Image (spheres, rainbow, N blue to C red):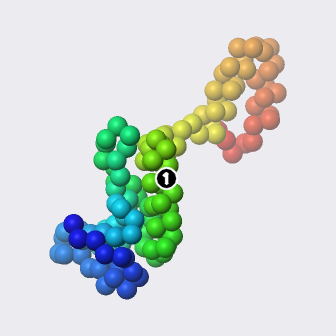
């Protein structure tokens, strides 16, 4: 796993090795690397260990959408939060599976109907915007 200071020129020249992925590791930020897929897409990742010792490969962003300098900054922020005991990968997964507005509204109406069974639900449904089912 040879590492060098990543530059835009190096990343632009990065090509996949047939159907295999190609990796370039940064020498400035430990764990930061670029993966080049067989499609030619190049993506920044950060590899780190959680407080429990689990190894994680965290996606930072696609090359082109963000620069190497921005990727380094995001990687430093991520490593800082990991050092404080957080797990950014786990937080990202939990955010994806969080409750939607429609689910929150349904849960509110169910609970509200228990408190105000006569006319609470009718009035409350009028307050919820029509685009939320």
- Which of 93/82 is in front? 82
Q: Is residue 37 above or below residue 51?
A: below
- Examine the image and state in which quarter residue 101 appears: top right
User: Label 1: which residue?
Assistant: 80
Q: What x and y, as percent, mark residue 2?
A: 23, 71
Q: Quadrant of the N terminus?
A: bottom left
Q: Is residue 51 above or below residue 10?
A: above
- Which of 41/80 is in front? 80
Decide: few, some or many residues near mark 1? Use Cα within 10 Å; few <14, some 14-19, many ≥20: few
Res. 94 in view:
yes
Q: What x and y, as percent, mark residue 119?
A: 81, 19
Q: What x and y, as percent, mark residue 25?
A: 30, 69
- Examine the image and state in which quarter residue 39 appears: bottom left
| x 75%, y 14%: residue | 115
Q: Quadrant of the C terminus?
A: top right
Query: Residue 78 vs residue 58: left or right?
Result: right
Q: What x and y, as percent, mark residue 121?
A: 76, 23
Q: Is residue 4 above or below residue 108?
A: below
Q: Is residue 106 above or below residue 111?
A: below
- Label 1 sits on a secondary structure element that is helix
| x 75%, y 37%: residue | 128
| x 57%, y 36%: residue | 99
| x 37%, y 43%: residue | 50
- Examine the image and state in which quarter residue 7 appears: bottom left
């Amino acid at each position: 796993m040879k590492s060098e200071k990543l530059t835009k020129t190096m990343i632009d020249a990065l090509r996949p090795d047939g159907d295999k992925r190609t990796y370039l590791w940064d020498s400035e930020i430990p764990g930061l690397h670029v993966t080049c897929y067989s499609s030619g897409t190049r993506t920044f990742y950060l590899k780190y260990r959680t407080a429990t010792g689990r190894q994680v490969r965290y996606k930072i962003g696609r090359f082109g959408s963000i620069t190497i300098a921005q990727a380094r900054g995001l990687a430093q922020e991520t490593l800082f939060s990991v050092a404080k005991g957080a797990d950014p990968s786990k937080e990202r997964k939990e955010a994806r599976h969080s409750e939607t507005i429609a689910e929150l509204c349904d849960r509110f109406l169910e609970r509200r109907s228990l408190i105000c069974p006569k006319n609470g639900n009718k009035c409350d449904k009028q307050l919820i915007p029509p685009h939320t089912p």
